[in-house]
Amino acid sequence: MEPLLEVKNLMTHFFTESGVVEALDGIELTVYPKESVGVVGESGCGKTQTAYSILRILAQNGQIVDGEIFYKGQDLVTLPESEMRNIRGKEIAMIFQDPMTSLNPVIRIADQMIEVIAIHRDVSANEARELAIDALTAVGISEADKRIDEYPHKFSGGMRQRILIARAIALQPSLLIADEPTTALDVTIQAQVLEIFKDMREKYDLAMMLITHNLGVVAELTERVHIFYGGRVAEVGTTFDIFTKPMHPYTIALLESIPSLDVDKGRLATIPGSVPQLINPPQGCRFHPRCRYAKEICSKDRPAMEEKVPGRFVACHFWEEVEISDLAEQVIGLKKNDIKKPK
């Protein structure tokens, strides 16, 4: 099967007064039709900027300096802006991080949905309104035909997130990018929103790229995972393999840091050191200053992303020496039943 989205050697830089921020340094990422892919890592690792680069909505000082982004075989990097507007929303839709600020507070929900739908689906305003109401109903908003004329402040955070999902699916995209879609929500509402994502994927045959730092959400919603660190990809594999047989030291460190009511850790595990400053990133492997397995070569030579076993890609010089810790083993044991099994 041909990838729906294929990102190759993507390099995005931000030009600031303090210097050049190497936000993305050779990102490789694929999403297949109807597949749900997780993009995981700490804040500042390049997850959101990858999405912004795909849609070409970077800040003014940001620039794609190298790489290719193929969507249905078409390179989005070289696509004229006039044609890129037809891709955004209609082909690739994005749900942004904060539902509280993603809707204009002084414009009715109807106006924020109908115009977008009418433009991208080539329908009349009345038809667009009906499509918007259908989408709102599909995500669980009752009396959608009445509530569509209300302002955002009349809705809770969870309801606003549902509206954003509805606006995205109403355009019938092939790929949905969700950037931390549950971060601003309480646990109960998070569970409801995750169920909506599951239902929408099944109903509309959506491919999804889920950006998050929440490994629990990844285990529940995705089939494959890309682990990001310092503007690079550290490891790629099926969700089941990433959770049960992690190969990169950073992946294991992430698993160790998951808090749990079922495991008595005494103290929460942390990853020593700090995330790298991408204005002056470490040479070699960007994780080496924090890695328990680091040797001299790690500070000099960048490890290549290679397929170590079928379907498993790892960027680490010493991946064969990596051992799953007792803490990570406990987390794996708890999560195994929740992890989506590979098809």
Image (cartoon, rainbow, N blue to C red):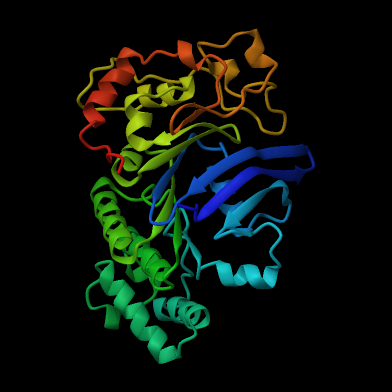
Locate residue 63 relative to residue 43 in the image: left or right.
right
Q: Is residue 333 above or below residue 2?
A: above
Picture coordinates of residue 330 (x, y %)?
Answer: 26, 20
| Towards the viewer: 242 or 140 | 242
Q: What residue occupies the far top of the structure in this picture?
A: 296
Picture coordinates of residue 265 (x, y %)?
Answer: 28, 17
| Towards the viewer: 158 or 170 | 170
Asked which quadrant contains residue 247, the reply is: top left
Q: Is residue 260 above or below residue 288?
A: below
Residue visible at 40% across and 24% down in the picture:
246
Asked which quadrant contains residue 324, the reply is: top left
Residue 276 appears in the picture as rendered: yes
Residue visible at 44% across and 73% down in the picture:
171
Locate residue 2 relative to residue 53 in the image: left or right.
left
Residue 148 appears in the picture as rendered: no
Q: Is residue 306 above or below residue 299?
A: below
Residue visible at 46% across and 79% down in the picture:
117
| Towards the viewer: 23 or 157 | 23
Asked which quadrant contains residue 270, the reply is: top left
Q: What residue occupies the far front of the structure in this picture?
A: 1
Picture coordinates of residue 19 (x, y %)?
Answer: 78, 37
Residue visible at 39% across and 88% down in the picture:
127
Picture coordinates of residue 111 (x, y %)?
Answer: 45, 81
Locate residue 166 relative to residue 87 in the image: left or right.
left
